[in-house]
Amino acid sequence: MNRRYRKTIIAGNWKMNKTASETKKFAEELKAVMPKAKWCEVVVCVPAVNIQTAIKAFKDMRVSVGAENLFYEKSGAYTGEVSGDMLKDLGVKYVIIGHSERRQYFGETDVTVNKKVHAALEAGLHPIICVGESLEQREMGITMELVALQVKAALSGVSAEKVRKCVIAYEPVWAIGTGKTATAEQAAEVCTLIRTTIRHLYGARIARSVTIQYGGSMKPANAAELLAQPDIDGGLIGGAALKSGEFVDIINAANQE
Ligand code: 13P
């Protein structure tokens, strides 16, 4: 973390979990344990159908609500899709883009990720752009090239002014939902590379202002060590974000002065 230059953001990615009633219950539980003062921003990214409930439930807790996806067109005949304007109008602040599960199961590519980043920024949302290598790619030794390419592709055509509104999440695919966390060194190495890539594209001043998160089996037991790395400015948390106790423990790990 480096709070002098950029925000620390702890974000939950609920994926396809929790009903609207469970969303309300989680918010009540979280409220009971949430620290009064926060030195980090807390975000919950919830399924689209739970957004309205979440906005209401988290309102007085200073927890921002995020979406897990959007479509890149503004409106039209795209059955089942949700636009950036629709999310913004509900009060959504962040939107996850290019999560590896969407790349794996729903055919998202670096090209569609780039289109979605532009659509999110256009709608006034903050994209949380996910990048990361698979186990095969790590074993092939191409992690750094691959992640740099994903970052460049996602930000293609994005202005310097707009890139400050983006968050990048480094999520090694082999660490997601597996209980296998990247070591702090592995995570730090790639997060530093991401910042270097942004520096080459936009210069040092912009690069140091961008929040870079780590995601992949982040939990109370490993959060403090990951967050102690200077280029890791927060977490994108799956499983542990579904339990209020674990989520708040991670928030507390990021809340150290
Ligand atoms: P887990 O924390 O469950 O490994 O999920 C990470 C993730 O995919 C967050 O987007």
Image (cartoon, rainbow, N blue to C red):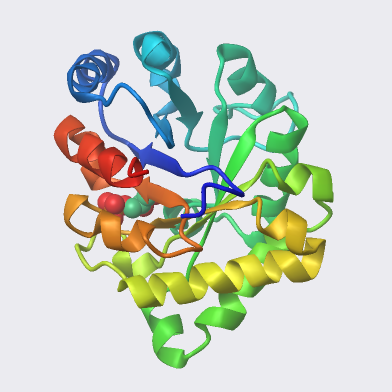
Residue 127 in the image: state x and y as whole percent: 61, 41
Does residue 230 appear anywhere in the picture?
yes
Residue 90 in the image: state x and y as whole percent: 56, 13
The residue closer to the viewer here, 122 or 192, is 192
The residue closer to the viewer here, 43 or 156, is 43
Vertical order, 10 against 109 (above or below): above
Tell which residue pokes out farthest to the front in this image: 257
Tell which residue pokes out farthest to the bottom in this image: 140
What residue sits 37% from the left and 57% below the top? 227
Does residue 155 appear anywhere in the picture?
no
The residue closer to the viewer here, 105 or 133, is 133
Residue 108 in the image: state x and y as whole percent: 57, 54
Vertical order, 218 against 72 (above or below): below
- How many numbered marks have been drawn onto this rendered protein structure? 0
Which quadrant would residue 157 be assigned to in this image?
A: bottom right
What residue sits 39% from the left and 77% below the top? 186
Residue 168 located left or right of residue 110: left
Residue 246 in the image: state x and y as whole percent: 18, 40
What residue sits 65% from the left and 31% below the top? 125
Which quadrant would residue 11 be assigned to in this image?
A: top left
What residue sits 63% from the left and 13% below the top? 89
The residue closer to the viewer here, 54 or 99, is 54
Vertical order, 224 against 240 (above or below): below
Residue 201 located left or right of residue 182: right
Which quadrant would residue 195 be assigned to in this image?
A: bottom right
Q: Quadrant of the C terminus?
A: top left
